[in-house]
Image: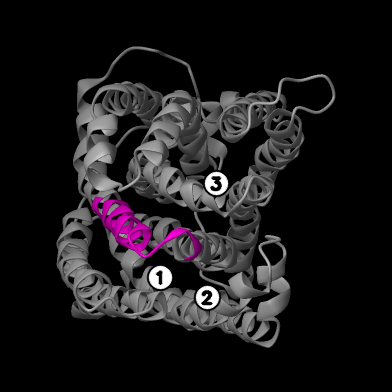
Amino acid sequence: MQNFMSNPSSSINLQVTTSHQQILKIALPISLAIMVPQLNFITNNIFLGGLGQEALGLAGITGVYYLIFAVVGHGLNNGLQALISRRAGENRIDEIGRLFTQGIYISFGFAALGILFTWFVAPIILKFSLHDPERVAIAVRFLNIRILGLPFLYVYQMRNALLVGTNQTRYLILGTATEAVVNVFFDYTLIYGKLGLPQMGFNGAAIASIISEIAGLVVLFMVLRYKGISKQLNLFKTWKFENANSHLIIVQSAPLIAQHAISIISWEFFYILIEHHGARDLAVSNTMRNMFGFFGCFTWAFAATANTMVSNVIGQNKQELVLPLIHKIMTWSVGFAFLVCLILNLFPHAFLSIYGQGEDFIQAGIPVLRVVSMALVLMSVSVVWMNAVTGSGNSSMNLATEFVAIIFYCIYVYTILEKMKLPITWGWGSEWIYWTTILIPSYWYMQSGKWKKNKI
């Protein structure tokens, strides 16, 4: 075993406990960090709503398209986070900085592929998917700009993996708060042409998002340096490409990348089917995506907590604590989700009215909101068990589970929306199908104890 006493970083203890206090200490800052980008999505849509329902609906399609590539980075982030958490649990501090550097290299490669795909392939796909040629043209122009933010987003996500994996989540909010403020300012000024800046309409939201991603990234790297975290974890000590660590990251992350990508691709399929139902239904569904993203922040924060804490505890060779830990995290996750569900169902009119689309829009959205809010409670259970599987090191299990869930999901939405042409409230019932299918195998796998054989 490597002797860490010769290195100053070896005196750092990054091992976690399994107490409720430790869970909240990790999860609450993550929830705030996740919430800010979701606020950015909502802010974009509120400002774009001022351009009409057509723009608001189109924002749903372009937003989900970009989300496909964002979750590729999220999959890479989750894989890297599990590895960093495992090294933290093992107190192999020197390995953390080396993993982080290789993660950045890999993320740049994926970003380049995403940009090229969007410029040369996406226009063809959108042309055959959407019914309105004018919508296609607007979406293509927007995405050609928006996709340029991908490299900054990916490095930003690698930073998330580092801070969550090393139990320093309190710093997450600094970068995301910066991103939120910058995004609101440039959304307002570039979409409507205020304070001497050009009026760019729909494309203004794309440029605002890119500027905010760059700003958030710069602030976080300044924090890493100012707080001494870069030196403490040996970040950027070497820029040498390491085949072994890169291969390890890709092997751990590839199933998660595929899992998240096919999940969001299926969501894009869902939105394309919704587009066939008209502009109002598309606009309503876009607001549901915002609600799902924003109010699911606590759920995803506890999911990330499950990933990092399970991996860390396994790294400490305390496998007997894993299942009790998952149950503790799940209790918190369900509690927050139930509270959100209650608030949304008591005040649906208030939440839908912020988009300024009129009473007809609100009345159409209320039954959908009720379905979505209850699905959030089921999701709060499923994602904790799913991310516990990720933390155990078996990302292939996640991919297999996702594949089965997506098959059921796509069959359901195509039958309901395209063949039977039922209202979109029934279409959003697909979330119940999806999260139930995710929960059953994830729960079974962790209860079976098969994960105890995994080494990463």
In reply to whether residue 154 is colored magenta, the answer given is: no
Q: Earlier in the sequence, mark 1 or mark 3?
A: 3
| Secondary element at image label 3 | helix
- Within 10 angstroms of label 3, few (less than 14), some, or many (20 or more) residues? many
Distance between the Cα atoms at labels 2 and 3? 34 Å
Q: Specify whether 336 is left or right of 266.
A: right
Q: Amino acid at mark 3?
A: Ala
Secondary structure predominantly adopted by residues drawn in magenta: helix
| SS for dot 2 | helix
- Name the residue that disc number 3 marks: 55
The first of marks 2 and 3 along the sequence is 3
Q: Are marks 1 and 2 in contact (CB under 8 Å)?
A: yes
Q: Which residues are magenta?
A: 262-280
**The N terminus is located in which quarter?**
top left
**Number of marks drawn:** 3
Q: Give the class, few, some or many, for how many residues have Cα within 10 Å of label 1's Cα (few <14, many ≥20).
A: many
* Real-space Cα separation, disc 1 to disc 3, in angstroms: 35 Å
Identify the disc placed on residue 384.
1
Disc 2 designates what residue? Answer: 333
Going by the image, does 436 lie left or right of 57? left
In this orientation, does residue 278 appear? Answer: yes
Q: Residue at x 45, y 35 (%)?
A: 158
Q: Are marks 1 and 3 in contact (CB under 8 Å)?
A: no
Image x and y of residue 133, in percent: 34, 38
Q: Is residue 91 visible to the viewer in this orientation of the structure? A: no
Q: Amino acid at mark 2?
A: Ser
